[in-house]
Amino acid sequence: MRILKDFKIPNFKFDKIKMKDIENIEEVKVDYERLQKKQIIKEKRKQRGYETTNYKTIKEVFDRAREKYADNIFMLEKFNPKDEFTKITYKEFSEDVIALGTALRNKYNLAEERIVIIGENTYHWYVSYMAMLCGVGIAVPVDKELPPNELENVINRSRATAVIYSPKKKDAIKKVQDKLPTVKYFIPMYSDDSLEGREVGFNTILKEGKEMVQNGDDSFSKIEIDPEEFKVLIFTSGTTSNSKGVMLCNRNLAENINAVNPYVRLYETDRFFSVLPLHHTYESSIGFLLPMSRGSSIAVCQGLKHIVPDLKETNPTALLAVPLLIESLYKKINQTIEKSGKTALVNSMMHVTNALKNVGIDIKKKVFAEIYENLGGKLRFVVSAAAPIDPKVGNWLQDLGIGFLQGYGLTETAPIAALTPEYDPRVGSAGKAVVCAELKIDNPNEKGEGEVLIKSSTLMLGYYEDEEATKEVIEIDKHGERWFHSGDVGYLDKDGFLYITGRIKNVIVTQNGKNIYPEEIELMLGEISEIKECMVYGKEVEGEKELIITVKVIPNMEEIEAKYGKDLSEEEIYDIIWNKIKEVNHKLTSYKAIKKLEIKKDEFVKTTTMKIKRYVEINKDK
């Protein structure tokens, strides 16, 4: 749904890598008895995982968090770029949620109404969403990058009666306000304005709610939530088609927490770094609801260009990201290592520390301390989801001593369906079915590949006002079980780990019935440093029966100019990249080989999880 015409990953700047403090690691002694005990624990962990939880609603999670973690830091946010990060406790957060919920229901009569939340990741967004889940009405999280006409469409489609928006969305809201007759209240975040017409400030509502609570109104806290009740409406970004409204209930979201806990151990001391947009279930469920369930904190990034300084200032232990962002960090750190003249030393230390780790000695954090410091100094694990990632990136993180996990799911599964356990991370896999889910492959071919079907208690109620579309993707078997057709192509290994090889709608089918998955080729092209981004597709050419395997490429001019010099002509740039592509073609079977190269001068149209909108890019040619 989101079109990112000008999206660019910033040019990250990292400190020079010196690695001058490495001590004599040959003198380290091996404690074989301790090693043996650790190995036994690890094997048992693989069999049974960590202890799980049994939440049925997010209100249960919220009530437990406000009682047990009241004095813990819930959030760190920089409200003014010149100031330090403000720390907000669970007590403050829970009081604001209850106040907002009380006033919205009992003063503004918005009980059970649909309320749009739109804006960047910020404290009032978290408060608003939690108030919805705990009893106000139906939350409609909306992409902050929507152009005014699409914003108007979503608000009208959802039949929202209130819109909570950040100050940065003020102009967009003003443009569409008069075309939204069903909206009773427009509520700007961080505003103290009293009610005037249809507009009232968020802070005013908070103040009113706190007064109501202080005067004895505890009705909001006493609301009992039906786990199956429709509570969240999310419009998908749609990389292959127009957006659909996904209806989720409290149980769907609560099961995400129950599903992740057996695979990943979280602590109150953990801190999640919030950089992905909250209107996506990946961030709002795994980056917000999950850490809240453990009393962990959340550090809100000020924006992509602030990632590195914000990492250093907030010292997170967990980073949820998409492949494009992780790969960009990987490339920039390695460029820094190379410029520092430490590539050989870092590679050597990776081999040495891996060997030591295999005999029970883990000194990676000490050896690679400077690299850790560039990422905040305490990073424990990185989670990648939303698209395929080059396995070498995951292996590199593991070699540094940073856990690398991959998750799999869709908005329709709220989102988690599979995850690699931290005690058995198989880089390259999209994960193993979480405890509340089951995966199977539909009509597998000779390689075991087919469409991935998902049965899960996180599976959506259905598509909003679209029963036909719901029936197209949810198949009910003879036992009455609901299986979701994901549209993804993949296979399961003997241990149940999922490997995604492509999307059904992206597949290129040759005249003799061979299937070509663009994602497979794109990962290989991603190895070419001269290529910044690329998209492989089957191009229709008049007079040709067969689709022509074509790649659109955005050149990495920084790398090209460093290697081949400046002031190159378009033809020279084309030849440089085509020669590199020919090297990849030699590694592919003939029918998969790229036949045509198109140099792209503008950015790819993307969703908010940075996936290329293939259908938009292909339709540009048509």
Image: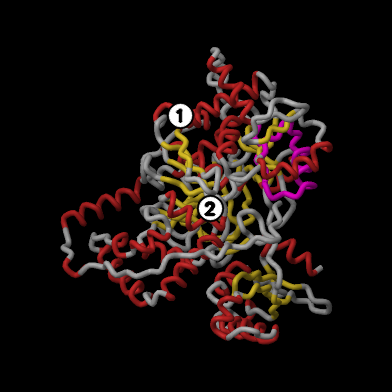
Which numbered disc, 2 or 1, marks the residue closer to the eye?
A: 1
Q: Residue sitting at 46 percent across and 56 percent down? A: 497
Looking at numbered disc 1 in the image, what kind of residue is underneath it?
A: Lys
Q: Which of 315 and 410 is in front in this view?
A: 315
Q: Mark 2 points at which residue?
A: 408
Numbered disc 1: secondary structure: helix
Location of residue 131 with respect to 585 vertically, above or below: above
The numbered mark, 2 or 1, whose residue comes first in the sequence reads 1
Percent from the top left, x then y, of residue 165? 67, 38
Determine whether the residue tagged by mark 2 lies in a helix, strand or loop: strand
Point out residue 460 in the picture as x, y percentages from the top left corner: 62, 40
Quadrant where the C terminus lies? bottom right
Q: Nearer the viewer, residue 450 or 520?
A: 520
Q: Name the residue under label 1.
A: 91
| Residue in front for this viewpoint, 574 or 175 | 175
Is residue 483 something one can see in this rendering? no
Query: What is the magenta range?
Result: 138-165
The image's colour scheme reads secondary structure
